[in-house]
Amino acid sequence: MMENEVLSIHGKPIDTEPNSFGELRSSADAVDEFDVLRARFEKDGYLYLPRLLDVDTLASARLTMLEALAELDFIDTDFPLRDGIAKRECNVSAREMVGLSKSNEPLRQALYSGPMIAFYEKFLGGPVRGLDFTWCRVKSSGTETATNPHYDIVFMGRGTKNLYTSWTPLGDTPREMGGLMILEDSHRLEEIKATYGQSDVDVFCTNEQDLHGTETGQKRWQGSGTGTYANDAIALREELNNRWLTTDYELGDLLVFSMYTMHASMDNLTNRLRLSTDTRYQLASEPVDERWIGENPIAHGPEAKKGIIC
């Protein structure tokens, strides 16, 4: 981090005092002790597993993604491609996410075979499947790129609730690049789980007077409209008196968390693109959310909408 540079979210400085901001607990010491890992996951709502994944495969996936982003004119080619220097603000659409994933064989190997699947089969105790949609995240610098606090369950809760998110950095990601943060003990916030945690971003109220945008997919849910729990991660931390936890991620690291673990990200304070994926895994025997499976998942859109009487 540059001298005197302050970590921020949407341009607002983060309080990095120990009672407000902390380090993710590493489980490198128990990577093959699955009873220990399950107990830690139950307690913390996440597992941080440094260097669990194959670095060479991920390095190939990163280079392939950078080549695709260069073709989309997001990379400043006056610099080495491997540096991922941003040429302009990068907002990757859902369609572009699918393209970045499907055309990247090393990425698919890293996410859907090898150490990733081996981990989940041992952790969950049986054959697993991943959701077919791959979320490819490309974050340029600026105060508009931070992700607001949310639970994943509101986006993918129509199948089993025993679904797990893997956040995988595609490159070394020091905290000034705005990597993922976990809100400590947020999986134990029973009131939030019982209210916001029961929401579905693709459900709309058929008895609302203003239905504009619901059936077309423009309107999401009857709360914030985006599925996020709060628009201010700093104020949320102060309100709940929980700490934000993060770390300086390296290529090969894996962060696993539950559907009810509140998470967000910080501003990218560098001139480099922050590349990552988030993918989901479950026991193959359990129900799956139909929005995220198949050759061309419907994702969030008109086909995913469900009208209810509110």
Image (cartoon, rainbow, N blue to C red):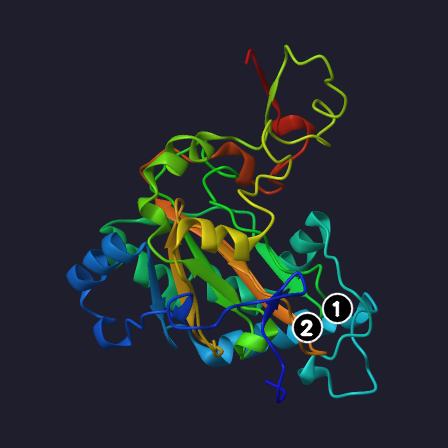
Q: Position of residue 197 (x, y in %)?
A: 43, 35
- Give the quarter of the image for residue 9: bottom right
Count of numbered circles on the image: 2
- Give the quarter of the image for residue 142: bottom right
Q: Classify the position of the N terminus by image quarter.
A: bottom right
Residue at point 69%, 30% (across, down): 219
Kind of residue sitting beneath label 2: Leu
State left or right for residue 80 relative to residue 120: right
Which element type, helix, strand or loop, lies under badge 2?
A: loop
State left or right for residue 196 relative to residue 230: left
Residue 36 in sight in this render = yes
Which element type, helix, strand or loop, lies under badge 1?
A: helix
Residue at point 73%, 32% (across, down): 218
Residue 160 in sight in this render = no
Q: Position of residue 130 (x, y in %)?
A: 44, 49
Q: Nearer the viewer, mark 2 or mark 1?
A: 2
Name the residue beneath numbered marker 1: 69
23 relative to 239, above or below: below
- Give the quarter of the image for residue 100: bottom right
Q: Position of residue 131 (x, y in %)?
A: 48, 46
Contact (CB < 8 A) between labels 2 and 1? Answer: yes
Q: Which mark is residue 273?
A: 2
Q: Nearer the viewer, residue 259 or 35?
A: 259
Residue at point 48%, 67% (across, down): 110
Marks 2 and 1, Cα distance to the nearest angstrom? Answer: 10 Å
Kind of residue sitting beneath label 1: Leu
Give the class, few, some or many, for how many residues have Cα within 10 Å of label 2's Cα (few <14, many ≥20): many
Q: Classify the position of the C terminus by image quarter.
A: top right
Mark 2 and mark 1 lie on one chain; the one further toward the N terminus is 1
Give the class, few, some or many, for how many residues have Cα within 10 Å of label 1's Cα (few <14, many ≥20): many
58 relative to 83, above or below: above
